[in-house]
Image: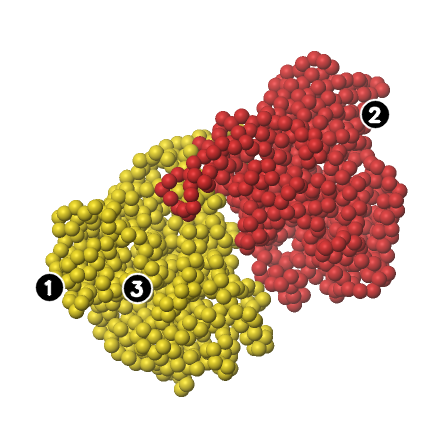
Chain colours: A red, B yellow
Amino acid sequence: MKKHLKKVDLKNVKLNAGLLAQKNKLVRKEVIPYQWQALNDELPDTEPSHAVENFKIAAGRSEGEFQGMVFQDSDVAKWLEAVAYQLTVNSDPELEKRADEVIDLIGEAQQEDGYLNTYFIVKEPEMKWKNLAECHELYCAGHLIEAAVAYYKATGKDKFLNIMQKNADLIESKFGPEADKLKGYPGHQEIELALIKLYEVSGKEKYRDLAKFFIDQRGKDPFYFDQEWEERGKIDHWDDFHQNVKRDYYQAHAPVREQKAAAGHAVRALYMYSGMADVARVTGDQSLIGACKQLWDNTTSKQIYITGGTGSSVQGESFTFDYDLPNDTAYTETCAAVALVFFAQRMLHLEKKGEYADIMEKALYNGALSGMSQNGKRFFYVNPLEVQPEVCEQREDHKHVKPTRQKWFGCACCPPNLARLLASIGSYIYSQNEEQLFVNLYADNQSEFEFKGQNVEVSQKTNYPWDEEIEIKLKAEKEVEFELALRIPGWCRKAALQLNGKNIDLTEIIEAGYAKIKRKWQKDRIKLILKMPVEKIYANPEVREDIGKVSLQRGPIVYALEEIDNGKNLPAVYLADDAELKAEYKEDLLGGVTVVKGSAYKLDKDSFGSSLYSTQKPEFKQIEIQAVPYYTWDNRESGEMLVWLNRKI
Amino acid sequence: MKKHLKKVDLKNVKLNAGLLAQKNKLVRKEVIPYQWQALNDELPDTEPSHAVENFKIAAGRSEGEFQGMVFQDSDVAKWLEAVAYQLTVNSDPELEKRADEVIDLIGEAQQEDGYLNTYFIVKEPEMKWKNLAECHELYCAGHLIEAAVAYYKATGKDKFLNIMQKNADLIESKFGPEADKLKGYPGHQEIELALIKLYEVSGKEKYRDLAKFFIDQRGKDPFYFDQEWEERGKIDHWDDFHQNVKRDYYQAHAPVREQKAAAGHAVRALYMYSGMADVARVTGDQSLIGACKQLWDNTTSKQIYITGGTGSSVQGESFTFDYDLPNDTAYTETCAAVALVFFAQRMLHLEKKGEYADIMEKALYNGALSGMSQNGKRFFYVNPLEVQPEVCEQREDHKHVKPTRQKWFGCACCPPNLARLLASIGSYIYSQNEEQLFVNLYADNQSEFEFKGQNVEVSQKTNYPWDEEIEIKLKAEKEVEFELALRIPGWCRKAALQLNGKNIDLTEIIEAGYAKIKRKWQKDRIKLILKMPVEKIYANPEVREDIGKVSLQRGPIVYALEEIDNGKNLPAVYLADDAELKAEYKEDLLGGVTVVKGSAYKLDKDSFGSSLYSTQKPEFKQIEIQAVPYYTWDNRESGEMLVWLNRKI
C-alpha cells in the first residue's frame, strides 16, 4: 500500500490568477488589515472586539477589564495564523513586524508556568481548568498553537512556537491518563488538530498522545462536564448553560468510535472529526479510521446542503437528523464550511478518494466563500439557501438569518477563520507522498515539489472554475518517476485528457476519482478538459424541503437567484425540466463570474387577483432568469435569494 | 335601514343530528365530565390543574398554596360557562347541583368588597391591580362574568350573576375616566365582551361604558404597562416579560381606531376585535365600526390559514405580517379559531354580510373542531397544516407543534374554550331581528322564534356538511310576515332553492351572500341544495409557503392527508390539476365523515437511489390518495399530516 498523502508546503505553491488567487489576494490586501482594525476596536459602528486590549491588560501594559467573549483570544490567534500564511508566500516586513509585536505581547501575557488565556488571567484566575465545557480555554490554546506553528514555518522564528510549547507542556501536565491529572477534554474541540501540528513540527510524541487522550476521553461515563460543574459549585458561565445543553452538543453523548451520525454543534463536530482523522493518520488506529469514515459518510450523504453547508439548526448551531435540511432557517455557519474543508483534506490524506476532494471543493467554493463579501469587509456568519428579508426581519424563527452581510460580529469566529483558510488555500491544491502527486483543486499556479531528491516544477494555467480547460506543465532537470493523480471531479460527467498532445483514455486510468499517470516526467504538458455544462441538480425525495425543486450547478459552483436580477417573490419561479440554460462569463460582474441564464416561469399574482384563496389557478408567465454563483450573493443589493427553484412538472 | 341582527336564545335551538349535534353531545357526555376531572386533578399522568383547589384555598376551605397559571381561575369559569349552555338545552339536575356548589365556592372565595381572583387573594394580595399587563386579573373576571350571565340565562338563578355584578362594580370603581380611577386596561382582552353581556342582561350602562373605556384607553401614550411596571418597582410576573414584550403583543401599539393590521397575540387580538364589535353595536360608534372592518379585512384576507386558523408564529402566539403563513410552524391556537368564530358572529351582527358567516363556518369546522379528539379527551393547542412527527420532536423551531393530541395542558385555555363554543353552538345557527331571520349555519335542528308576537317553528333536516341538501320547514299558528335569509356560502358555486316545491331563481334574491325571501309564512317547506363538488383551492402566490400547492375542500370542510391512509413522506405527493377526485361518505369512519379519494403522484425515492443530490430526476409513481376532514386528523394513529399538496404543473 502506498503511503498516506500529506499536505504540501504552502511556500511551494504560488497562486497566479483566477478565483482562488483573487480571494487569497483579497485576504492579504483587505481582510488582514480590516480585521486588524476590528481586533483593535478601530471599526466604526461595530461592536468593539477588545481582543488585543485583553492581551495588553493580561500583559500588564493596560489597566482595565477583560471584555468580549470568553474565547476572544482566538480571534487574535486566527488573525496571526492568516498573517503567517501570507508571510509564507509574500514577504511583508511591515506586517511581520506587527505580528512580532503581537507575539511579544502574547509572550508578556503568558504566566510564569506557561498559562496563557487572557480571560482567566484577567478576570477569573481562580477558575482555570474548572469550566472546560463552556470557557474555551483549550480551544483558545489550540488556535494559538496553530498560529504559532504556522508562524514558525513561515518565518523560521521560534519565539511564538516556544511560547505555545510552554503552554502545551503546561496543558499536558494537567490533562492525561495519569492518576494525578484531570480527565477532561475541550468543550469546543480545536486543540486536537493543533497538538498534531505541534507534534509534527516538534517531533514530541506527548503532544500526539494528548490529542489522542482528548479524543478517547470524550463520551465516557460519568460525564466529565457534569463532574466539573458539580465540583465548581454548579456555576455556569452562560446562563443555565449546563442544564440546557445536552451531551451531543459537545459530541460527548458516546465515545467517538461509537458515534454513528454527525451530531451537536457543527463546528465542534467537524473540528473533532478533523482531529480524529489527524490522530488516526499519525497513530494508524483502525477503529478511529472507521469512526472517521462513518461520520464522514453521515455528514456528507445525509446532513449536508448542496452548498457544502452543514448544521441545519440555529438551536445549538447544530446538526439535526438525516435529510433535515431546511433552506430558509439553515444555520450553515461559515466556520462549519471551513471546518468541513479541514475534515475533507484530512480524510483524503487518510484515504485517496476523490469524493473527499469533491466535498472539499464544494464547501470551499460555495458555503465557505459565501461568508465574505467581494470587498473583504462584510461577512455572513449564517449562510442560508433561501432568504426573504421581510421574513428574516420579522419572524423570530428566522432571526438568526441576516439578509445582509455584516461588518463584524460580537462572536467573530467566522471572518478570521475564513481568512486563515483562504490565506493558506495554496496548500489544499496538491497532496503528496514520496511516489505520488495528487492534484486536488484546479487553479492557476506555479509550484515546486521534490521527488527522489529532484525538484519538479508544476504549473497550472486555467481560469477554473469558470473555464473547462486546465493546462498543466511539469518540468524537471532530469527525468523522475512518480505518479501524477489528477482529480476528475464527481460533478464532471465528461472529461478529456491529453498528454503531450496525445489523447489518453480516461476510463482506463481513473481510480477512485483520480486519473493516474505513472511515468517518468521531465518536460511534459497535460491538457485536461472538465466539461461544465449547466447542470440541474435534484435532491433525494427524503429531503422534504427540496421536494419538487431543482438547483443549478456548473462545475463546482452552485448558483442562486437574486432579487436584483430576477425581481421579488423568487419562490414563485419555476424551471421546466427541459429548460435550456446557458453559461455566460461576465468579466465586469462580481469580480468576474460565469452567470447562468435561461427562460423560466413565474406564478403570476396578477392572474390570481387579490383573494387569499381561490378555486381559480394562478397562471404562469414566462420570464428570463439570471443566476449568479451562490457565494457572490448580497454583494450588489440586499434582497431575496434562492438556491432551490421549483420544477415545473 | 333594518335593525342589527342579534344572537338568538340558545334555549330556542335544539340540535337533532349531524356533526354539530354530535360535537355538542360529546361536550355534554364526555368533555364536561372529563374537564371536571382535570380541574380537580383527577386525571392520571397529566399536570395537575389545581384550579378548583385554588378557589377552596381562597374560600378558606383548604390550606395550601395557589398553584397553576395566574389565570387558572378562567378554566373553572369556562367550564361553568359550558355547563350553563348545556343546562340551557338539556336538563341535568346532578350537573346543575355540581355547578351550584362551584358557584357557592366562588361566592365564598369572593372578598367583602367584591374582589375575586384566587391568585391575588391567596398569593399576592398586595399586588392587586398592579400588574394588568401580565396577570390576567381582568381576563379572569371577564370569563367569570360570561359564565355568570350564561348561568343566569340557563337556570334563572341569580346568585352567580350577583357575585359577578359585585365584582364588576368593584372593577368599575377602580377603572374609568374619572381622575381618581386607574387608566389601565387588560393585559389579555376578554372582559370587554363580558361587560357587554352584563350590560345587556342587567341594562346597566356603566358596564357598557367600562367596556368602551377599556377599548378606547388601549394604545394611548404614555404606555400604561410601562407606567404600572415602574410603579410596582419593575417587578415582572414572568421572567423579563416587560422588557421582552412589545406593545403590539397586547394590541397597545396604537389606539384601536388607528390599527390597520391584525397584530400581536392572536387570541388577545380577536377577543379585542370581538369586544370592539360589541361596543360598536351597542353604541353605534361609526369610527369603531370602521376599525372593526379594517381589522376584519386584514385578518381574513391577508393573515388567515385556509383552516380558519390565525396566528402564524409561536413567538408571542401571534399574527405576523401579510401573507406570512407557514404551514409546519403555524401556531393557529385552538382558542384563536374559537375567538374568530366570536368575532365573525359579531361582525355579522354589525353588518349583514355572508362573508362573516363564511369565515365563522370555516373557523368552526376546521381550525376549531380540530382542537378536540373524536372522544373528547385529547386536545390540540396548536393546529398546524403540516406535520412531520420527527421534525416536531427534534427541531427546536417546531417544538410548539405537538404531533399528537394531548391529555391536558399546563396552560389549559383551549379545551374549555372549545367546550363553551360547542356547548353554545346552537346560538350561532340563526340570527334574528324583528323583521328578519338569518340562517347562518346548516345543521339538523328544531327551533322556535317569535315574530310580531307569534311563535314560528323552524326546523332543518340535513346531514350537512356531508350532504348537499337541506330541508327547512316553517310552521306558525297564524301566518306572519318576515324575511327569511338563507346563507349561500361563499364556497358554493352552484345552489338551488325550492319553496313549497317551486323553484326559485336565486340570482334575483341573493344579497350579500344571503338568499332573501320576504313573505307571509305559516306552513312552508324549503329545499336548499348547496352543490359540494370536491374543490381544488389555490393560495395567492404572495403566500410563499403555498406556492405551487393545492388544497382540497368540499363544502366548508378542508381536507388533509394522513400517513395512516397515504404512507410516509406526504410532502412528496403531487396532484395533477385535472385529477378527478370523488367524495365518499363513510359512516364508520371518524364518527361518519365524507372522505375524498383520487389518483395522485408521488416522487419515488427508489427511482432516485441513495444519493443526497443527483443530476438524475426523481421519477413519479402513481398512487391513490384518501383525504380526511382536517379536523379529524390524529384520531386514529399518530403520523404525518398535510393540507397543502404539490400541484403537478
> Which one is in front, A30 or B570?
A30
Within 10 angstroms of label 3, few (less than 14), some, or many (20 or more) residues? some
Q: Left or right: B567 with respect to A407?
A: left
Could you tell me residue B55's position as x and y percent?
39, 78
Residue for badge 2: A455
Could you tell me residue B59's position as x and y percent?
39, 82
Label at residue B4:
3
Q: Is residue B635 above or below residue A553?
A: below
Using the numbered discs, state the Cα–Cα distance from disc 1 to disc 2 in whole angstroms. 117 Å
Q: Quadrant of residue B479?
A: bottom left
Q: Quadrant of residue A458?
A: top right
Per the image, label 2 sits on a secondary structure element best described as strand
Could you tell me residue B332's position as x and y percent?
43, 56
Query: Badge 1 sits on which subunit?
Result: B
Label at residue B478:
1
What residue do we see at 51% from left, 74% from top?
A: B131
Give the quarter of the figure containing the C terminus of chain B.
Answer: top left
Could you tell me residue A170's position as x and y percent?
79, 55
Give the quarter of the figure containing the N terminus of chain B.
Answer: bottom left
What residue do we see at 42% from left, 43% from top?
A: A609
Q: Are marks 3 and 2 on the same chain?
A: no
Label at residue B102:
none
Q: Is residue A294 above or below residue A459?
A: below
Amino acid residing under circle 3: His
Amino acid residing under circle 2: Asn
Q: Left or right: B603 with respect to A475?
A: left
What residue do we see at 66% from left, 47% from top?
A: A405
Query: Badge 3 sits on which subunit?
Result: B
> Which one is in front, B385 or A61?
B385
